[in-house]
Amino acid sequence: MTKCILIVDDEEDIRAITKMALEMGTDWTILTASSGSEALEVAAASHPDTILLDMMMPEMDGRATLKRLKADAATQPIPVIMVTAKAQPSSLTEFEDLEVAAVLAKPFRPLKLAGEITAILGWS
């Protein structure tokens, strides 16, 4: 069964590179959103299997978007993988209170991303 991934990032080039890398290495359906508010709409309408959520975005950041996703019964069960440039060991404590499947550091290696997502979520 094919998976559906929602990539949420305000940077167009990051969305494009991530989408291309996941499409090249998998048969997954890749959706994108450029903001937290757009992510809420896409997630509610499409029910992706997981969401890659950028932490630092204008207007509604990743933390606020995650809070809204987890507060909505329709999107609450979707696993979220937070993506951030701040994922240094010393700053990981700020993510401990978040309901996320994992935190991935930017920059990540696009061609290894599908394998990382598969491992994090236990997909075979």
Image (cartoon, rainbow, N blue to C red):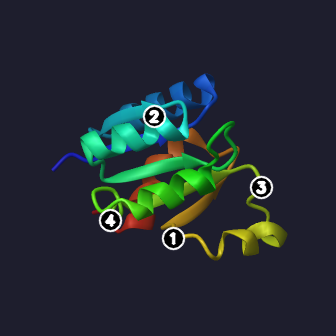
Q: Nearer the viewer, mark 2 or mark 4?
A: 2
Can residue 119 be seen? Answer: no
Q: Are marks 3 and 2 in contact (CB under 8 Å)?
A: no
Q: Which mark is residue 77?
A: 4
CA separation in Å, label 4 and label 1: 10 Å
Mark 3 is on which residue type?
Lys
* Mark 3 vs 2, N-terminal side: 2
| Horizontal and vertical percent position of residue 88 | 79, 63
Q: Residue at x 26, y 41 (%)?
A: 46
> Where, quadrant-wise, is the C terminus in this rendering?
bottom left
Q: Secondary structure at mark 4?
A: loop
Q: Residue at x 43, y 63 (%)?
A: 70
Mark 4 residue crowding within 10 angstroms, few (<14) / some (14–19) / many (20+) = few
Q: Are marks 4 and 3 in contact (CB under 8 Å)?
A: no
Mark 4 is on which residue type?
Pro
Q: Nearer the viewer, mark 4 or mark 3?
A: 4
Q: Secondary structure at mark 1?
A: loop
In the picture of the structure, the residue carrying the numbered disc 2 is 38
Q: Nearer the viewer, mark 1 or mark 2?
A: 2
Mark 1 is on which residue type?
Glu
Give the vertical position of 31 relative to 64 (above or below).
Answer: above
Q: Secondary structure at mark 3?
A: loop
* Mark 3 vs 1, N-terminal side: 3
Q: Are marks 3 and 1 in contact (CB under 8 Å)?
A: no
Mark 2 residue crowding within 10 angstroms, few (<14) / some (14–19) / many (20+) = some
CA separation in Å, label 3 and label 2: 23 Å
In the picture of the structure, the residue carrying the numbered disc 3 is 86
Q: Report the front residue among 29 and 96.
A: 96
* Mark 2 vs 4, N-terminal side: 2
Q: Which mark is residue 99?
A: 1
CA separation in Å, label 3 and label 1: 17 Å
